[in-house]
Amino acid sequence: MLSIIPGVMTGLGILGTFIGLSFGLQNFNTGNAQEITNSIAPLMDGIKVAFHTSIYGMVFSLIFNFVYKKTLEDAYHAVDQFLDAYHKYVLPKTENDNLEALLSFQEKQLQATREILAEFGDELSEKIARAIVNPYRYQTEETAATAEPDQPKNHFID
């Protein structure tokens, strides 16, 4: 409920502006020069009311906002201090501390598992590559050793 007060104050200031202007314009007469001169004083009085209500509405809104927010901040700070003292002297946060330690340990386990899986993947890919490449290398070396050295190798079929 308190949070709407600054808006209400500003709204009342704007409403006062329109009311003051309407009072000022209500008796304004646009007849001859004498009637215009006579109606300027009430118009100016209405404009004064309009500007004063706007200024008062905005100033009170700003002051209320400042005081309200400062009081609210002080209250939150006092509650935080109370809770800290309560958890320090009355009921320590053992459950929360144990839960936080468990979560930290699980995060470390997860990171270690990721590292192991990355290493395992690298080693597995190397072994698979060697398993594929080594038989072909052996076969190539065996073919080269059994070929006759004096005979030219013809790779084309006649």
Image (cartoon, rainbow, N blue to C red):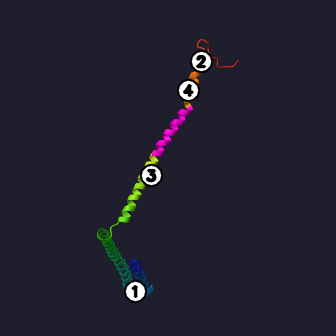
**101 is higher (above) or lower (below) than 13:** above
Picture coordinates of residue 24 (x, y %)? 41, 85
25 in the magenta segment: no
User: What's the magenta region?
Assistant: 116-132
Three-letter code for the amino acid on which mark 4 is drawn: Arg
Three-letter code for the amino acid on which mark 1 is drawn: Ser
The circle drawn on residue 90 is none
Q: Is residue 70 toward the left or the right of residue 156 in the image?
A: left
Three-letter code for the amino acid on which mark 3 is drawn: Leu
Q: Quadrant of residue 72?
A: bottom left
The circle drawn on residue 39 is 1
In this view, the residue in front, 129 or 81, is 129
Q: Quadrant of residue 78?
A: bottom left
**C-alpha distance separating marks 2 and 4:** 14 Å
In this view, the residue in front, 60 or 48, is 60
Q: Secondary structure at mark 4?
A: helix
Three-letter code for the amino acid on which mark 2 is drawn: Thr
Dot 1 or dot 2: first in sequence order is: 1
Mark 1 Cα shell of 10 Å, populated few (<14), some (14-19), many (≥20): some
Question: Which residue bears the numbered disc 4?
Answer: 137
Q: Secondary structure at mark 3?
A: helix
Question: Which residue bears the numbered disc 3?
Answer: 110
User: CB atoms at circles 4 and 1 under 8 Å apart?
Assistant: no
Residue drawn at (52%, 38%) of the image: 125
In this view, the residue in front, 54 or 23, is 54
How many numbered circles are shown? 4
Question: Which residue bears the numbered disc 2?
Answer: 146
Residue drawn at (51%, 36%) of the image: 126
Q: Nearer the viewer, mark 4 or mark 1?
A: 4
User: CB atoms at circles 3 and 4 under 8 Å apart?
Assistant: no
**102 is higher (above) or lower (below) than 148:** below
Q: Secondary structure at mark 2?
A: helix
